[in-house]
Amino acid sequence: MADQYDVIVIGGGPGGYIAAIRASQLGMKAAVVEREHMAGICSNWGCIPTKALLRSAEIYGHMGHAKDYGLKADRFDFDISEIVKRSRQIAGRMNDGCQFLMKKNKVDIIWGEATITKAGEVKVEAPKKKPVEPQHPKPKVTLGEGTYKAKNIIIATGARPRVLPGIEPDGDKIWTYFEALKPEKMPKSVAVMGSGAIGIEFASFYRSMGAEVTVIELLPQIMPVEDAEIAGLARKRFEKRGITILTDAKVGKVDKTKDGVTAHVELKNGEKKEIKAEKLISAVGVQANSENLGLEKIGVKIDRGIIVVDDHCRTNVEGIWAIGDVAGPPMLAHKAEHEAVIAVETIAGKKVHGLEKNKIPGCTYCEPQVASVGLTEAKAKEAGREVKVGRFPFVGNGKAIALGEPDGLVKTVFDAKTGELLGAHMVGAEVTELIQGFVVAMNLETTEEDLMHTIFPHPTLSETMKESVLDAYGQALNI
């Protein structure tokens, strides 16, 4: 007889394992079907290990400017193998931690490839890859082949790098983020195709470590989802660091050479360029892992590879749910985690607010950092809003000057009639930590008056946030 669960989650990434934990907390019997590694791409090959690399790059960059702080560090170098080793060890630690959480919360892990044979039933077969075993401790990994039943099935299968025809990654000269995360040696030159968060973070890392970097972006603006003003300031900083940026630029083809690759690029004005580099990182987005799950057979609606869901993560088939990247943009780990809670609490019969995508923050951990939430100035105007816009530069902030980080800007967008905070956009040191203040404000429906009457500690970078609000209403005090 098939094992019976209240909830089966397909995929053990940040959305999947959180869904299973929350289900267990609410008294449901839960299981996760995972084919390769718990904690998903985020902890194993994305969010966490990239931040480990970027942290090494940040410290290395500070060492190069030691004299600016009255310090001496005349002789210093890096060992890329040790940088990568540290990153992979951190990824392993996250994987172990996730499996510990499964055990702690009495969630079953079923290793294998899942197919939904019908509503309420999942068939699991042996995985094509050997599952990643936890290291501390290291129990025997057992396969979970068989048929399992559940009242509710949550699909959390994530996404994978998008591949452009003719520019397929080969693991050698054309990389995805998998290969870019673990270089065996530091390339002297790198071309990055795509300027979203993944592309820009790798461009920033490799430039910090001394590589010549060229970023090629199809659209007129790098970091296309960001406010144009913030993206423009970030571009100036990137270029000041020596990164070459081509926008309105299409890669027609890529030739592999003895020493690397040659990317044939056509600009909007018709000009053609040949970009030569040792490595090409393809960072042109991701595509959802919605195939081979049996969804078409049971009638789950899919649009261009994305599983269609409502704001509570329901599909059109009763008892089938989808969360995270496979359920569409923004493809962010924290969005997946939030959807996990929404889906499970809805299953449990709780009254839950649906997902509000305009309140999901986005962070890019490059140098300088970029962070945002809500509407850009352009999008707010397109929506017919009359806006008040505030700006405050880091150069007017004492903490930023003391840190040696005077280049940055906080921008806020308010509804001129109601005082509603519509969006906040930042570039500069530690803005990925600062943005959450504005996220909380938006969720609490805070007005400009509330923010003006809030006391921000001094000296902190967060004071730039209040000053930006004040500036929107002509009351900035420190500039």
Image (tube, helix red, strand yellow):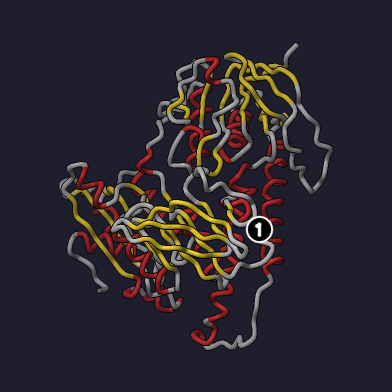
Indicate left or right for 187 with 459 as reference.
Answer: right
Indicate whether 248 appears above or below 161: below
Residue extending farthest to the top is: 1
Q: Position of residue 432 (x, y in %)?
A: 45, 58
Q: Position of residue 371 (x, y in %)?
A: 41, 56
Does residue 244 appear in the picture of this structure?
A: yes
Q: Position of residue 230 (x, y in %)?
A: 33, 61
Q: At x 56% / y 87%, what residue is drawn? A: 71
Indicate whether 97 appears above or below 10: below
Indicate whether 2 appears above or below 185: above
Q: Which amino acid does label 1 sit on?
A: Lys
Q: Viewer-proximal residue, 341 or 292?
A: 292
Q: Viewer-proximal residue, 218 or 316?
A: 218
The C terminus: image quadrant: bottom left
Q: At x 50% / y 61%, what residue is drawn? A: 191
Does residue 205 appear in the picture of this structure?
A: no
Q: Mark 1 points at which residue?
A: 182
The N terminus: image quadrant: top right
Q: Viewer-proximal residue, 262 or 205?
A: 262
Q: At x 52% / y 46%, what residue is drawn? A: 166
Figure disc tally: 1
Q: At x 35% / y 60%, what residue is drawn? A: 231
Neighbour class for label 1 at 10 Å: few (<14), some, many (≥20)? Answer: many
**Disc 1 secondary structure class:** loop
Q: Viewer-proximal residue, 438 or 284?
A: 284
